Image (spheres, rainbow, N blue to C red):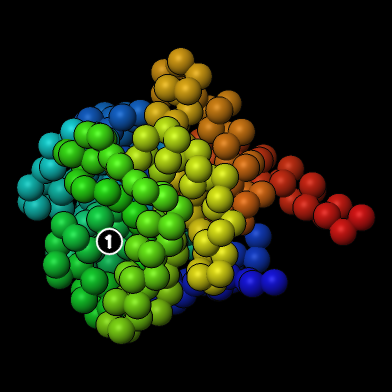
Amino acid sequence: MLHPQKTINCKGSLLLLEKPAIMGVLNLTPDSFFDGGKYADLQSVLRQAEKMIQEGAAILDVGGVSTRPGAALPNLATELSRVIPVVEALASRFPETILSIDTFRAAVARAAVEAGAGMVNDISAGKLDPDLYATVAEIQVPYVLMHMQNTPATMQINPEYGDVVLEVTDFFIREIGVLRSLGVKDIMLDPGFGFGKLPEHNFRLLQMLDSFAFLEFPLLAGLSRKSMVYKTLGITPEEALNGTTALNMVALQRGAKLLRVHDVKEARETIALFEQLDRFDSW
């Protein structure tokens, strides 16, 4: 049986993935699809970060760019002004917590790591900034490699696949090779639910998530309150927590080692129940 990497070195802080871990989402944007504008000042960010840590988040993922379909991308200066003061404050206040910077820009990744981040989470696989891969290799932090068809502005305009699982697999193999050749050591894989995919693509990827196990890298599932939940159920993102929990359990059963979520307590409970269920696998 294949086993993914279980220890990720985040600038000296070890992320242990013997058991599934939680990445809490901290969106600092006014227009994110679910929590845009909720954390408009530093004190509200720190309160939310503390709540997530107390509830069980091993990682806080800080983002200053909305990547919802059709969202306009802010310029570099705006993104830096949103995220760097927050990363500095979080690193000072919660030094034991791993911070991830959710960005596609090399300059933001570098500045955030200098400010205290220990991981880069990039939706674009280096396609929106040609310097991103080399920068990640230079600053020597773990990298979340995510699949996206096209760009945030165009990704949901008639996405097409012959075989979505095969195409995402080929993408992972190709990009892992590039990252390895540059010297990136720690990689996590995210199939990119909702990024250039129709509902049938998303559910097929979830159904076949364990097919990526042969790559032997930890799998990240970012399902939290996404359209595959709320559009399927005919509800709003605000009502999509229960559906998110259901799909997170499926992701865990199919090998996910990281859950990226807005709701940490519920994700922690899901992991606890999954682990209890997993104990009886050999009976």
Q: How many marks?
A: 1
Q: Quadrant of residue 169?
A: bottom left
Q: Which residue is mark 1?
A: 125
Q: Nearer the viewer, residue 215 or 261?
A: 215
Q: Residue furthest front?
A: 162
Horizontal side, residue 270 vs residue 108: left or right:
right
Residue 225: percent from the left, percent from the top? 45, 31
Q: Which residue lies at the image location 32% right of the left edge and 70% below the top edge? A: 175
Q: Nearer the viewer, residue 169 or 30?
A: 169
Q: Regarding mark 1 in the picture, which secondary structure is present there?
A: loop
Residue 275: percent from the left, percent from the top? 74, 51
Horizontal side, residue 121 vs residue 15: left or right:
left
Horizontal side, residue 227 vs residue 64: left or right:
right
Looking at the image, residue 152 lies above or below residue 234: below
Residue 238: percent from the left, percent from the top? 43, 21
Q: Which residue lies at the image location 25% right of the left edge and 34% below the top edge? A: 158
Q: Nearer the viewer, residue 122 or 265?
A: 122
Q: Which residue lies at the image location 48% right of the left edge and 28% below the top edge? A: 229
Density class for disc 1 (Cα within 10 Å; few <14, some 14-19, many ≥20) is many
- Report whether residue 255 is seen: yes
Q: Quadrant of residue 174?
A: bottom left
Q: Quadrant of residue 84?
A: bottom left
- Report whether residue 22 is seen: no
Q: Which residue lies at the image location 15% right of the left edge and 53% below the top edge? A: 80
The quadrant in which the N terminus is found is bottom right
Circle 1: residue type: Ala
Residue 236: percent from the left, percent from the top? 41, 18
Looking at the image, residue 19 lies above or below residue 203: below
The quadrant in which the C terminus is found is bottom right
Q: Residue furthest top?
A: 234
